Amino acid sequence: MSDTSTTAVAPITLTEGAIIQLKRIRDEQNVPADYGLRVGVKGGGCSGFTYILGFDETKEQDQVSEISGMKVIMEKAHALYLLGMEIDWVEGLNNRGFAFNNPNASDTCGCGTSFSA
């Protein structure tokens, strides 16, 4: 029996713009149907942690949620850093890409992909 659990309450939020772009990427990259969107953190970056965002298989230590029809997976240990975070898609003059709005971050860097907690 797997340790993977499914939660009723979504740990993060994906904006409509982020969902549209993620579905486009999933289709363009021919991501297997059983893969989910992995959201996580890893050590590094100019502020201490960087975000992980990509499609992956579910692993034993993962928590699985469904957000606006998108299967979202994250390691249970990463929830401390990510709960309440909003992922948005931004298209502006100075940048284009995913933006991470994290209420748990005590400091962020200028690139917006690194934070400390």
Image: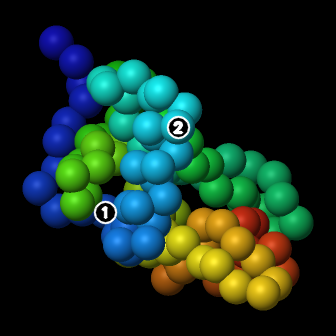
Q: In terms of sequence position, does the residue under pointer 2 or pointer 1 come before the other?
A: 1
Residue 65 lies, in percent from the top left, at 24, 49
Q: Is residue 7 above or below residue 13?
A: above
Q: Which residue is mark 2?
A: 28
Q: Quadrant of the C terminus?
A: bottom right
Give the image quarter of residue 31: top left
Quick one: SS at disc 2? helix
For marks 2 and 1, give the CA distance: 27 Å
Question: Contact, CB < 8 Å: mark 2 with mark 1?
Answer: no
Tell me what residue is drawn at x 49 percent, y 59 percent. 21
Can you give x and y, in whole percent of width and height, for residue 92 in the image?
70, 85
Q: Which residue type carries mark 1?
A: Pro
- Relative placement, left or right, of 20 versus 4 is right
Q: Name the side, left or right, on which 43 lies relative to 57.
A: right
Q: Nearer the viewer, residue 36 or 44?
A: 36
User: Number of callouts in the render?
Assistant: 2
Q: Amino acid at mark 2?
A: Glu
Q: Quadrant of residue 27?
A: top left
Left or right of 102 in this view: 23: left
Residue 11 is marked as: 1
